Amino acid sequence: MTVQAAPADSDAPTVDRSRRHFLETAGLAGVATVGLPFALSACRQPDAPDMPQNLATAATSLPKRHEISPGQLDEYYGLWSGGHSGEVRVLGMPSGREIKRIPVFNRCAMSGWGQTNESKAILGTRADGTMKYTTGDTHHVHASYTDGTYDGKYAWVNEKIHGRIARIRLDTFECDKITEIPHIQGFHGIFPDKRDPVKAEVNHTTRVFCGSEFAIPQPNDGRDLDDPTKYYSVFSCVDAETMEVRWQCKVKGNMDLVATSFSGKLAAANQYNVENGAMLADMMSAERDACVFFNVARIEQAISDGRFYTLSDSKVPIVDGTPEKNTDPKTALTAYVPVPKNPHGVNASPDGKYFICAGKLSPTATVIDVAAVERWFEGEVPEIAQTIVAEVELGLGPLHTAFDGRGNAFTTLFLDSQIVKWNVEKAIAFYKGDNNAAYVVDRLDVMYQPGHLNASMSETREADGKWLITGCKFSKDRFLPVGPLHPENEQIIDISGEKMQLIADHPVWPEPHDFIVMRRDIVKPRQIYDLAEFPNAVKESRVVREGRKVTVHLISVAPSFSLPEVRVKKGDEVTVILTNMDKVEDLTHGFALPKYDVNFIVNPQETKSVTFKADKPGVYWFYCSHFCHALHLEMRSRLLVEA
Ligand code: RUQ
Ligand code: CUA
Ligand code: CA
């Protein structure tokens, strides 16, 4: 069935209730959301039947309900990077309600992240015991896979400034490990692998691949400062469980975003600076940059064969993936697919067939056949450029691509402030010479300048084509002004029908870069912590002195702390270990200590500790800072510091 195009105007749809009712009772409602496969080119088909415009508009613009009524739960978890807030955020989708902020590379005054000894052990500390870094810039959140779809175990997020990757447990939605990757700067793209390239039985994520944008002298110890021709970048593989860096691969040029194949054999990164330029003009001098592919099994074989080197005091094995050293496809570790000038995102289509590299400076997307790249590595494809099956125009400033699982791709056009929906197989047919293959299905204006976008379950085998979220870098006039700096605008788009429907705007504080949207049944959050996971859990409350070190073993049970007073001497180094023995979900207590700048919470069956110097004599009420009970205000005890 073919439907006449709705008007190009794509403002938030207002659906006339009576018409919707009419359509539903007339049994036509389904038309709005399903049953229109590939009628896309309607707007371009001269022979489309003359359908009454108003009916067509209504039929194609019925928005799916996205409002979640009070008391109702969202259908999806959204994991949002918080940009240079250093955090990760959890949003319910499709409501867009923010449910949690997960501190990762930032200090959190509520949870004590960055202050508790446990969080500092994860974050890393300086000699004086403070956080090693207090700045962080999160960009990309991706989650672990089993069998080509999310398994709800872990998520990872990169931190661009200092080159760190963090893991988030999806049972507690908390960060449990952070790794600082050696020899990189401008750490940008990450992607978990989807299965093991060698061990066929391992069908889940065991590695996370990491790109890096900025080439630096290797080692970066003061040599080669003025000679950028000697700088280079390395691609890193991090073990998903241990979070140790398994290996690195030296490349020609830089890396930006990362994608992985469903076969587990390949990882790839788009490169916008094959020139290895240190100046802007140099970075844009080549006509084509590249999408570099890594043959994971071969790299790991090279390492087990001892064909690697190491740098400075790091033990991480590094292999040479530069083109000069990888000329024979049958032994090559890497393959450089030439793509138009300064590309941006690279995304894997959910059918496993294609990697799509967005043009950024070129108005095109390049479609790379993943199986053909695998065949190139077997010597079966003469030229690497032959793995490109389409290079089609989409509009100005293509950045990132998402998928609906029905053969369509959605690409952000930064300069055009649009999302373009296009059909991948038709684009391939068009590129092959079929001029009738109208691959552009729809365009939607978004507000404004979109960077990332993602669709529900997009880069999994279960891409369901229901919701698309786009992260607009500018909100301009969409929200009440709050001074010179505005929030960004996350827009929710219904993609269940042929035409995209803008459903809602949400202000988000700068700046989310990327996000994923995961079905809620995949995630199994815990209700309380497991005491056994805390080796320092307090079983018996007491104060133990060893010289000038005093350890306060403290228990909280609503509405009191186990010790009514704690007495120490001026100059003591005090460690408070607090275990929350309450067993009721969400029965959380806080520990706030005036003038000593201490605050953290402990969730049911959790243990945390903080160490500080008791350098101010006097009486200090430590109190519960998290509302827990009718006697929450009374939940306080005294720290007595003797002069
Ligand atoms: S990048 S706007 Cu940090 Cu993900 Cu593309
Ligand atoms: Cu315990 Cu408030
Ligand atoms: Ca370039």
Image (tube, grey):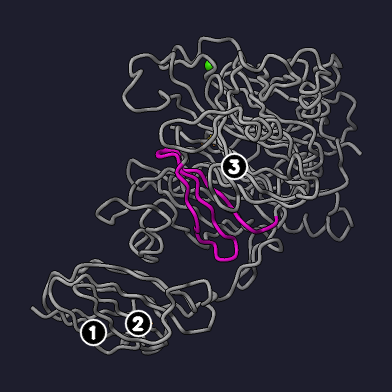
Q: Nearer the viewer, residue 105 or 20?
A: 105
- Residue at x 28% of width, y 81% of height: 544
Which quadrant: the N terminus? Answer: top right
Report the amino acid beneath label 3.
Thr
Q: Which residue is mark 1?
A: 566
Callout 2 environment at 10 Å: few (<14), some (14 to 19), or many (20+)?
Answer: many
Tell whether label 2 touches label 1 (CB within 8 Å). yes
Above or below, comparing residue 293 to residue 601 in the picture: above
Q: Nearer the viewer, residue 559 or 217?
A: 217
Q: Is residue 393 left or right of residue 306?
A: right
Callout 3 environment at 10 Å: few (<14), some (14 to 19), or many (20+)?
Answer: many
- Residue at x 71% of width, y 41% of height: 500
* Image quarter of residue 616: bottom left
From this viewpoint, is residue 451 visible?
no
Callout 1 environment at 10 Å: few (<14), some (14 to 19), or many (20+)?
Answer: some
From this viewpoint, is residue 139 visible?
yes
Q: Nearer the viewer, mark 3 or mark 2?
A: 2
Judging from the image, what secondary structure is the residue with disc 2 in?
Answer: strand
Q: Which residue is mark 3?
A: 470
Report the amino acid beneath label 1.
Val
Residue 28: x %, y % from top left? 87, 53
Which quadrant: the C terminus? Answer: bottom left
Report the amino acid beneath label 2.
Leu
Q: Nearer the viewer, mark 1 or mark 3?
A: 1
Q: Which residue is mark 2?
A: 554
Mark with earlier residue (1, 3): 3
Mark with earlier residue (3, 2): 3
Judging from the image, what secondary structure is the residue with disc 3 in?
Answer: strand
Residue span colored magenta: 151-180
Judging from the image, what secondary structure is the residue with disc 1 in?
Answer: strand
Residue 516: x %, y % from top left? 62, 48
Residue 130: x %, y % from top left? 28, 55
